[in-house]
Amino acid sequence: MTKPRTQRVGIVGVPPLSVIKALAAPHITIYDLDEPQGKIDIETASPFLPRVYCGILRTVIANSLIIRPDTIYIDTGPGKCDCAVHTATVLTDSMPETRIIRTRNQDTTDFGTPLCRTRMNLLEKMQAITASVQSPTPHQELRPCSPIAGFWGVPPRDFSLLSLFPDTTHIYGWARCMENKTPDNLKLELHYNPDIPTVFFAQSFCAKTALARHLATKHPHALYLDCDVTAGNSAKAKIQAFLELSGI
Amino acid sequence: MLLADFGTSYCKLLDTTAKSEPQLIASRDLDRNLQVDIGTGHNGKRHCLHYVNELTALARGGISLIREESFTLLDCGSRDIKYVAYSGEKIKDMGWNAECGASMGFTIELLEKYYDLDFTAIEVPASSFSVTCGVLGMSHIFDAVVTGNSEAEAVAKFVKGIAINAYNFAKRPEKIYLSGGLCDNPLFVGSFPCPVISMGRFVLLEGLKVSYEQLSIP
């Protein structure tokens, strides 16, 4: 029996569960193209996408050009964004040797959100959530903690800003939808806890900045924050001051 | 106990054991080996034992000095602008612009010296330039002078543009409490489209005093 050829598969967004199940094979290596991979320079993307564009999707292009996956599954449905639709077109035209498969993840089976609600270093928690996207198996049960702060939003391009939060920070927004494996779940995305100070985060130039800012105005104790490629000193100072001044 | 706000152009220094006023020292004249107990500001981290975030120092100074439950306090420094907004004694919003709003205070001081202007004698102009940063705004001044405006008139429009930019950055509050060296510039203060209450240069030092009390540093 012939051993299947090793395949490199890139994913963008949260692929439907059926795709993740199909990719769960030892000869397939999955690359989460939304996240920085090694030391790939984001400027690699500049000939293909404007510099003033979502930092996550610029990262997708930069990663794709360097990693050169055999196949890329890119979610272009309501669970991702319009920018991903156009990025898929750019990928298709720029990488003819790579199979670009557009998906529309509208899965509705709730997998639960134990990571979002447990006590854990927030950076590691977010890493665990993004890693969980690649697994079709049910989540491990984790004891929920009582939250003292909230982080609402998407996994940031620069995870270092998460290191400023306490371990008992609960995660809300699209990152929670990710863990639940229902990226197109507006009801869940809109959910927040009004009783805890919450940072509403979105990537600069992302459509979700509107929602993040809107919810921050509704929340009684919130900070709206957007960052581009890296979290600068002023962004980090804002988080730190907000938490300090909220008594955390 | 030595407290200091290490700004880009000026360092504000307070010895809490002395009964004297805070000292103002040009940052370029600062002793490189100076070490204080609690510090804040752009140049602060290498000069202090305990560093307090600038926004935190500003907010704590504001709470200590302003007798209102809801307020917007804007600090206009040499290099950056930042603000905190409180509502019902809770932090409601904050911002720190060190990039696009950069170098406004520094540029105003440079212009004052270069054109030998007296800002107490210049009236607030009716119109302003659209200014997003000190450096980019300079070209408006040069263009205006070339087209017949006096230097004072051109700089006044620039200063008003900066004030309006800072006002927009602070989300257009009904009233602004203003902190920083630009409180001493009547043209700048008068250029805001809302009432301004000047708090002076030492609000962050006041915030450090509060931090000192909260930290109970020996």
Image: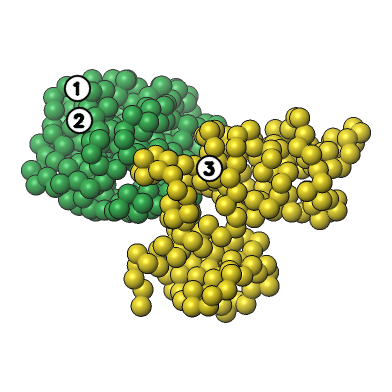
Chain colours: A green, B yellow
Compared with residue A140, is residue B218 higher up or lower down, i.e. above or below?
below
What is the chain letter for disc 2?
A: A
- Of callouts 2 and 3, the N-terminal one: 3
Q: Which residue is mark 2?
A: A181
What is the chain letter for disc 1?
A: A
State whether residue A74 appears in this view.
no
Secondary structure of the residue carrying tag 2 is loop
In the rendered image, residue A241, in percent from the top left (x then y), is placed at 40, 52
- To which quarter of the image does residue A35 belong? top left
Of the residues tagged 3 and 1, which is closer to the observer? Answer: 1
In the rendered image, residue A107, in percent from the top left (x then y), is placed at 19, 22
Mark 2 burial class by Cα count in 10 Å: few <14, some 14-19, many 20+: many
In the rendered image, residue A204, in percent from the top left (x then y), is placed at 46, 35
What is the chain letter for disc 3?
A: A
| Residue at x 62%, y 77% (from the top left corner) | B31
Q: Nearer the viewer, residue A9 or A123?
A: A123
Q: Verify CB contact (< 8 Å) between mark 1 and mark 2.
A: yes
Compared with residue B129, is residue B11 higher up or lower down, i.e. above or below?
below
Q: Which residue is mark 3?
A: A43
| Residue at x 16%, y 37% (from the top left corner) | A113
Both marks 1 and 2 on one chain: yes
Q: Which residue is mark 1?
A: A107
State whether residue A81 appears in this view.
yes
Q: CA distance from mark 2 to mark 3?
A: 31 Å
- To which quarter of the image does residue A24 belong? top left
Q: CA distance from mark 1 to mark 2?
A: 7 Å
